[in-house]
Image (cartoon, rainbow, N blue to C red):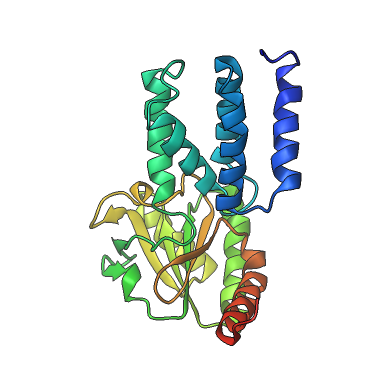
Amino acid sequence: MYIRMPNNLYRNKVNEYLDRMFMPHPDTITHAINEMVSKAKKNPETYKYLVWTVTIKYQQPEIMGLDEVFVNIYDQYFATGEMDYWANATLNKNLKERADQLRKSLIGKTAANLIMQDENLNKKELYQIKNKYTILYFYDPDCGFCKKETPRLKSFYENTKFDVEVFAVCTDTSLTNMKKYIQQENLDWVNVNGPRSYKGHYKEDYDALTTPTIFVLDEKKKIIAKKLGAERLEEFLSSHEKMLARKEEGTP
């Protein structure tokens, strides 16, 4: 049976069903999608359109952590060749690149180490930070959003009650611009230059295509949050600590 409704109406219905009926957890959403797809498979066009609808929906999800759903969709429906009857080589290549980039920096994954030069050309390493939490901050000195986010992050850094260090990665190739920005903003956390890396480009390991982008790492360098605004960091860490306390007490 073919879809007999406007495409946007179908898409809205799918989105409404997934958003309202299920907990926003990657495993839960992936299971729900698989159940929907199993029914849609009876018709190739419906099958194709449903898979593509959820692929687009979770490539840049509004809820933190649901990008894992996109990776799951790619692995199950594109990497296996199931969508080859309509997805061309270019599309498959683009989806693979995006999925592979995302899978390295999903929540729950151990963050890849970063080894870069600071403003004085000294080697700095992400894994050398021993604080309980690390805020990994990707920014560009000329980015308008970064000019607003950096002061907010600095305020958090100077006033937080938590044991935190910031590992700030400047994406600008100009060391001069980086130094000027550090002095201008009076940034006394760990500052490094992204292009001056000892182990490849940071975009190979982190979903940081735009600036500003923030990741929160725990003491084992596991990613516990990503793409949070600096103004939400204190609240997030408070909630995270309460969750850890409940786990230790054995309460749900």
Q: Quadrant of residue 154?
A: bottom right
Q: Position of residue 80 (x, y in %)?
A: 37, 31
Name the residue furthest left. 198
Q: Quadrant of residue 38?
A: top right
Q: Residue at x 63, y 57 (%)?
A: 148
Q: Residue at x 50, y 48 (%)?
A: 68
Q: Is residue 146 left or right of residue 82?
A: right
Q: Residue at x 75, y 31 (%)?
A: 13
Q: Position of residue 74 (x, y in %)?
A: 45, 36
Q: Is residue 123 left or right of residue 159?
A: left
Q: Nearer the viewer, residue 81 or 89?
A: 81
191 in relation to 219, above or below: above
137 in relation to 155, above or below: above
Q: Say how many tags the image has.
A: 0
Q: Nearer the viewer, residue 6 or 230?
A: 6
163 in relation to 114, above or below: below
247 in relation to 5, above or below: below
Q: Is residue 17 left or right of residue 227?
A: right
Q: Nearer the viewer, residue 244 or 183?
A: 244
- For the N terminus, the quadrant is top right
- For the C terminus, the quadrant is bottom right
